[in-house]
Amino acid sequence: MQIQDLPYPDPGVPDARSGPRFLWWLFRNQLGGQLTSLAWGLLHFLAVSGLPFCVGLAVQAVVDRSGTRLALTGGLIALCGAGVALGECMLHRAAVTNWITAAARVQQLLARRTAQLGSALTRRVAAGEIVAVSTGDVEKIGWFVEGVSRFTAAAVTVVVVCVGLVVYQPALGVVVAVGVPVLALAVLPLLPRATRRADFQREKAGRATELASDTVAGLRVLRGIGGEELFLDRYRRASQEVRRAAVRSARMWSLISAIQVLLPGLLLIAVIWRGVHLAVDGRITVGELVTVYSAVMLLTYPLRHFEEIAMAYSFSRPSARRAARVLSLERATDTAGSREAEVPDGDLYDPATGLLAPAERLTAVVCGDPDVAGVLAERLGGHPSEEGTSVLLGGVPLDELPLGSARTAVLVQDKDPVLLSGSLRELLDVPASGEVSAAEALAAAQCGDVLEALAQGSLDADDPMDARITERGRSLSGGQRQRLALARSLITDPEVLVLDEPTSAVDSHTEARIADGIRGLRTGRTTVVFTSSPLLLDRADRVVLVHEGEVVAVGAHRELVHSEPRYRAVVTREVDEEAAPSGVLTDGRPAVSGGLTDGRPAMSGGLKDNSAAVSGVLAGEEAALGGVLHEIDELEEIEETA
C-alpha cells in the first residue's frame, strides 16, 4: 500500500483484545511494507558498517605503500558511500510510508467504528478520549509500527558486525562481541519504570484533552452561569499535571540516553587499551586496530535504534490500548444482518412499547422523560443501545437488515444534531432520493434568516450556498443550527424520518411555520416526531403518549388534552388537580380569560401566577447552581488534599 492509494478499500477486522495484540495485527497487515523497509535498512546499516573495514584497509595500504590496494579501497569506500546514500533515502521513504499507512488504517478503523455505533459511542467512551485516540495516539501507534523494521535491520547489522570482527580480528572481536550485548541490554531494568511514567503521562494528557474538549463544547453555557474561569482554572491545573508527568518521564529517558552514550564510550576505551597493547606486541597491525576502533564507533549508530524502539513501544502501548478499547466496542445488533439488503416500507411498529406509526402519516410521540424519548428514537432507527425485540418496518425486523439498508430506510435526527465545517452546499450534499430540492428543504425548515446571516458573515460568497459554516456551526444560534440540521434531514427524504425535538430552540411563530412545512413536504412519507410542543402536536395525524416505557394513549391532540391527565401534564406543564375545568376550552387549552390562542396563559388573571412560577423556577435554579458549585469546591479540596 502506497500513500497515493489511501484510503484502504477495507481496513480489515482488527484484533482489539489488547494493545500489544492490536500492534501485532497492524504489523502483520503491513508485512510487505515492513520487508521493504527492512531491506533498505539492511543496505543502509551494512554500508555504514562497511566503512570501518574500508578505512582499515586504506590505512594498511598506506603503511605498506601499496597504491593498488589503496585505489581498490577507494573504490570500496565510494561503493559504501553510494549504499549509505541510497539506503538512507529509500529507508526514510519506506519508513514514512509505513508510518502514514498504519496511522491511516487506524483512523479508518476508528471512523468505521464510530459510524457503526453512532450516538451510542459517546455514552460508552468520553468524546475527549475519542479525539485523543484519533489524533495523538494514532501518530504514536504509527511510530512504533514503522520503527520495528528499522530496529530489526539495526539488530541484524550489529550481529553481522560482531561476527565479522570476531572473524577479522579474534583478539579484539571477542571484546566487542561480549560488550555490545551488554550495551543493548543495560537499559532493560530501566524500561519498566520509564514505561510506567510514559503511561502516567498519557493518562494525564488524555484527561486534559477530555477536559479541554468538554470546556470548549460547553463554553457558552459556562459563560452564562459565570463558571468560565472556574473550568479554565481546572484545565490549567490539569495541564500542569501533564507538564510535571512529562518532565518525570523525560528525566528517565534522558538517563537511558546517557547510559547509551556512556557505555559505548567505556567499550571504546577498553577496545583501544586492549588494541594498543596488542599492536605494541605485534599481534595486530595498525590497520586492524583502526578497523576495530572505527567499527565500535559506528556501532553506536545502530545501537541508538534499540533506545528508539523501546521509547516507541512505551509511548505506543497505552495509545494502542486506548484504540483497542474503542475498536472493541460492538453494536447491540449485527451490522451485516441476516437478510438481504432491501429498503422495506409500510407501518413502523415497536413491539417493546406498542408504538405504531402508520405509513404515510405524521405521528407525534409524547414522552415525559427526554432520555426515554432519545432511546426510543434510536430504537425506531434500528440503533438499539441493548439487545431486545426488533422494531418492525412493514413487518421486516430492522435488526435483521444490513446496517446500510436500515439507515437508508429510517433516518433519525437526534435532539442535538451536529453541523460539520464547510459550505452550506457541502452540508446539504447528502445521499437523497432527489425528490426534495435544497430550496424546498430550506424553505420548509424556515431557514431564510439563516441564509441571510451566512451571506453577511461570508463577504467573499455571492451565493449563500457557498457561505462557510464554522465547526459545529458555532457562529450560528441554537435555533439556526437546529433548522439547518432539519433541512439536511428533509432533503434526504427517507422512507421514514424520525425527529427528536426538532423545534425546541425556535420561537412559537417559527415553530408553527416549521410544523406546516414538515407536514407539507413529508406528504406521502412516514414521519415520527418526538415533541411536547402543542403547535406540532396539533398538526399531527396521530398522537401517541408513551408513559413508563409503553403506549398508554392514542388519539388527536385536542382529544388527549381534554381526556388524558398524564398527557395534559406533559404538554401544558400543569398538574391535573390545579387545572380549573371552567378555564379550559374543548381542545384542552386555557380559555382566553386564562390563556391565549397558542395555549399560553393570558395576561388577565395569569400574570401574578406566572410571576410566582418564574420566581420559583429561578429560585430553584439558583439553589441547584449553588449546590453544583458547592460540590465543585468540595472536589477541589479533595484534589488538593490528595
Image (tube, rainbow, N blue to C red):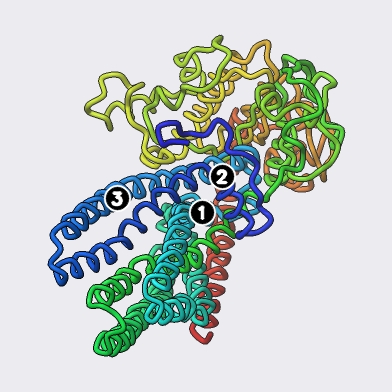
Distance, label 3 to label 2, CA atoms, is: 40 Å
Mark drawn on residue 83: 3
In x, y percent, where is residue 239?
40, 70
- Kind of residue at badge 3: Gly
Dot 3 or dot 2: first in sequence order is 3
Residue lying at 27% horizontally and 62% vertically, measured from the top left: 51
User: Which image quadrant is residue 344 in?
Assistant: top right
Horizontal placement of 542 versus 106: left or right?
right
Closest to the observer, 244 or 565: 244
- Kind of residue at badge 1: Val
Mark drawn on residue 110: 2
- Is the C-beta separation of discs 1 and 2 under 8 Å? yes
SS at mark 3? helix
Mark drawn on residue 242: none
Q: Please say if 78 is above or below 112.
A: below
Disc 1 target residue: 133
